[in-house]
Amino acid sequence: MNLKRYLSKLIKIDFIKSFYVNYSQFGFQGILKWPIILEYAVKYRNKGEINIEEMSFYMLSINSKSSIEISKGGKLVLKGANSCFNSGSNIIIGKDAVMEIGHRFYCNGRSDFNCLKHVVFGNDVLFSVNIMLMDTDFHKIYNNRDEQINSNQEIIIGDKVWIGCNTTVLKGTRIGNNIIIGACSLLSGKYLCENSIYVGNPSKIILSDISWHY
């Protein structure tokens, strides 16, 4: 990173809010290592907790005009470093829900992440823009015996997954490793054929034996 680019990023950091987040979650160790970086105009509300497996500098950056809300009992678990939700991202982690993030997760921005049960991002996961991810329907549906029939279901995304713009990832989705999801796709089910490209609504394999560079 050249000096001009480094300085332009540095002046965007909300040091007061970042200090508060790191100290309130991790004590003095958080101040020494600054694992969480928040830029200006980030809405932060946390009644839950942020857990870190092995603390290091700059594990997660949440950029300007984004928001993150963690409800009571909710957990954000950082299992790696150099991850980022870019500008315009909205992250909701509900009551007793867990979101896990691996190494080098990156969202280009303007996307919504709704975790009311369990969401896992592996290593080297890349999201484009305008993506909706939700492990819930938000509203309950009942059958004629007054039994709920649409429970929340976890979303598991493997390593080295690239998800194209304007894609919707619904509850119960599982994605394997080294997979590309094409733009404007709808995901609801299992996409486990590695080294493949899935596209469409519903998404299907259009190409196999591929690789891509993060």
Image (spheres, helix red, strand yellow):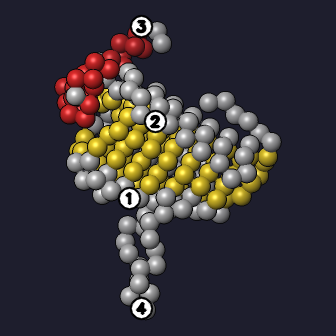
Q: Residue at x 59, y 55 (%)?
A: 174
Identify the residue under disc 1.
116
User: Tag 4's secondary structure?
Assistant: loop
Q: Nearer the viewer, residue 207 or 46?
A: 46
Identify the residue under disc 3.
3
Q: Residue at x 49, y 58 (%)?
A: 154
Amino acid, disc 3:
Leu
Q: CA distance from mark 1 to mark 4?
A: 25 Å
Q: Residue at x 40, y 54 (%)?
A: 115
Which residue is situated farthest in the top direction here? 3
Amino acid, disc 1:
Leu
User: Which x, y percent locates residue 208?
Assistant: 79, 46
Whichever of callouts 2 and 3 sits on the residue coming sooner in the sequence is 3
The image's mark for residue 186 is: none
Identify the residue under disc 4.
145
The image's mark for residue 79 is: 2
User: Which x, y percent locates residue 40?
Assistant: 26, 30
Whichever of callouts 3 and 4 sits on the residue coming sooner in the sequence is 3
Q: CA distance from mark 1 to mark 3?
A: 41 Å
User: Tag 2's secondary structure?
Assistant: loop
Q: Is residue 15 above or below residue 98?
A: above
